[in-house]
Amino acid sequence: MIACCLARRIRTVLLVFATALWWQTSTGLAADNPNGKIISEVITVNNYIRKKEDILSVMQTKPNAAYDTAVAQEDVYRLQRTKWFDPRSIQISTVDEKDGRVKVFVYVTELRSTVEDIQFIGAQHLGKNELMTMSGVKKGEPMNTFQNEMGRNNILKKYHEEEGRTYATVELIEGRLSTDTRVIYQVVEGPVVKVGSVEFRGNVRAITGRLREQIVNKPELMLFPPKFKPVTLDLDRQKLIEYYHSLGFLGVQVTPEVVHTADLAKVNIVYHIVEGTQYIVAGKQVDGNKSYDSATLVGLTELQPGDPYDRRKAELDMKRIKEFMGNRGYQTMVEQQLFEVPGQPGLVQVHYEVINDTGTQKRVGRVRIEGNEVTQDRVILNQMDIRPGQILEYPQLEVARARLARLGIFDPDNPPTVEVIQSPNANDWDSIYQDVLVRVKETRTGQFMIGGSVNTDIGLMGNITINERNFDILRFPTSWDDIVEGRAFRGAGQEFRIEAAPGVEFSRYAATWREPYLFDTPFGLTESVSYNQFAYPFGQYTEDRLSYRVTVDRRLDPYWRASVTARVEDVGVVSVPSNAPPSIAVDAGYHFQVGLRAGLTRDTRDSIVYPTSGSLFNIGYEQVFGQEQFPIGTVEFTKFLSSKYFAREDGSGQQVLCLRTMVEVEGGNAPVYERFYGGGLRSMRGFEFQGVGPFQNGYPVGGNFAFLNTIEYQVPLLTNDKVQGVVFLDHGTVEQNISIHNYRVSIGAGIRIAIPMLGPLPLALDFAVPINKAPQDHKQLVNFSMGLFGGPG
């Protein structure tokens, strides 16, 4: 009975609603085209928090104005931007009045309350602006309880992972309900927790010192204990596992444990290690290859059966296979799969899987460049050495990318990319020709550097340098905008450098310009003008040298480089003592001279700063013209040798033997300022700078023949290889002519300390004692060198 009555009532309501809707439509009350009609009233619907006046203040549609559909649509956008309402709910409609006017209805669905205040109670070490940014909450915006909770998590993460406040808590005490009008966080910061110690337990084959080098909390930082950041634990665990994999321990288990001290100010981190079995390579093979036979590709690999499995060697093997095929135009990927040998625990079969080897050799279609607004296309193309029509050498793409990045003229945070794309003229990726797309983002290329250096040869020097790496000597400004926007004198990839290096004993002022690809050829051109002033250490005279040099060089292959240099100089020999010997006094005054030199260099070193293998060979001949005409010949050879026998199992800790010899010969009529001297850092340690050579009246007068040699052995003293010990034997002589009358020998030991803030070269400190010397030579027990350099401005 009740159900029947309820059903009759529902049918009655629906009938009344349908009748009213039909009547409204049939009588014309619904506005069909309201444009131009006067608005009688604007009615807001479903607004409970926001007053009608607030809504109308945002809108342009107002009573007594003519209705405009376009203006009404703009009002919808205006109301959406307030963030007061659900943007999908905002609608504006009209109904005709009998007097010809229209009534406007604004339908909204409110987004709860709005944020009127934000507080962070208890926060002392983080500023309110920073906390506001992390919370993502802003005054005047709708109350968003989800965002408020996200903000709490972000703030807590900041305290735990960056501030080292492990015990910090953050509670959202207001802002959890949609009806709240305030967002209030209660913060208990707690103390900063430091790392007290790092310990490794269970490691047998791996050296503790090398394990410390793999993790974030390195031992050298313990002098200033780092903040404890829990997020680093998993990162360190993964790095330790990867390190063990490189040693062949594929089943290693690493479990970090955090032990809090009683005062809760520090934590001690213990990494529990179960090394497991060191796997041995049972065999290796290459699969999936179509372009080359397996024997050829297997021959490229270094990992051998019977060796402990080494992940680093396996990665190098995959790289060699990929580069071998890539250099021949075959784009492939190489992956590694490991299979345990059934019934033989500890043995693993290594499979190198060649992927996407289609057997189709690719060639370069077009080379497209994007993003260079100032830099000329030719600068980029010269660095890439990739031209249309040639075989597409895929490893060369990475070489090109690295060379572009090394130029220093592109944004390091958004470095250049070089990728292969399908040619628009090709039907598919199986086409022979593929385009190469280069994307770059330019950055500021000017540098201002300030710093200095000190060593026992030439004392203390300051240094101020202005350097532009993307110079264009022919790009003159055509407007003021060219100067303001940095287009003037930029874009050709040239380098222009101005340097001022005042010193106590030696000063240098120079300007240098270099074009690395002259007329887009492999030849480079360098021009420089300099002024040097040097007060010789034994007071024999002061040298002023104004010089102009021009060099044309040509790289012959990755190792060999040839060069031709011309120098034009005005050399002054001044402040000559009254008791100076004739060989010095005769050259007093100013001298004009021109020198022409041809040189050849071969460099196979694996590193310029810290070489462990390879060699450097340099030979040159120069003919000098002027008041005196004489030749100068130089030959220098340095060889670096290292043995894996003395290295650690992971390849670190290499001991390096360095052998160096140099021979210099010049004409017997060479003036005093062109003669050879010995002694000092790169000559003969144990003697003062220029303290080796012929002497007259107590003054060094230099020789026309120099023969200098060094045997040096370098051993790492710490497991991080940043502190090296050296022992050395320096020997040789400087004579007035090609002969050996006084052969000098010195022995010594020293230390090299890598300090990043001092630049790429390490701090060097050597102690040496002469065991054979000439009567007038000057001894010096200590030799040291240290450089300080500022960053780009």
Image (cartoon, grey):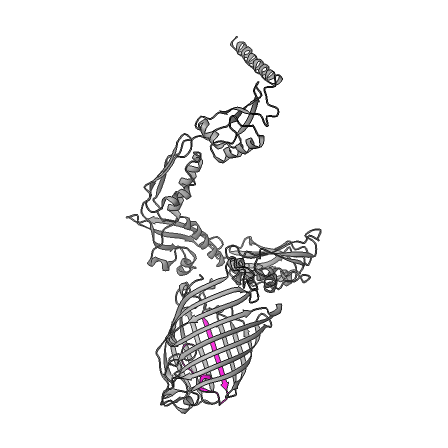
| Residue extending farthest bottom | 582
| Residue extending farthest left | 263
The residue at the point 43 percent across, 90 percent down is: 586
Q: Nearer the viewer, residue 411 or 42?
A: 42
At which x and y percent is residue 158? 39, 46
Q: Nearer the viewer, residue 70 or 498?
A: 70
Q: Nearer the viewer, residue 460 or 658?
A: 460
At which x and y percent is residue 451? 40, 67
Residue 263 on the magenta segment: no
Is 401 situated left or right of 272 in this image? right
The residue at the point 52 percent across, 8 percent down is: 1
At which x and y percent is residue 723? 39, 67
**Residues drawn in magenta:** 655-681
Compared with 273, 11 (above or below) is: above
Compared with 167, 486 (above or below) is: below
Q: Dividing the picture into quarters, in which one does residue 16 lie?
A: top right
The residue at the point 36 percent across, 87 percent down is: 577
Compared with 547, 80 (above or below) is: above
Residue 659 on the magenta segment: yes
In the rendered view of the protein, which quadrant contains the C terminus?
bottom left
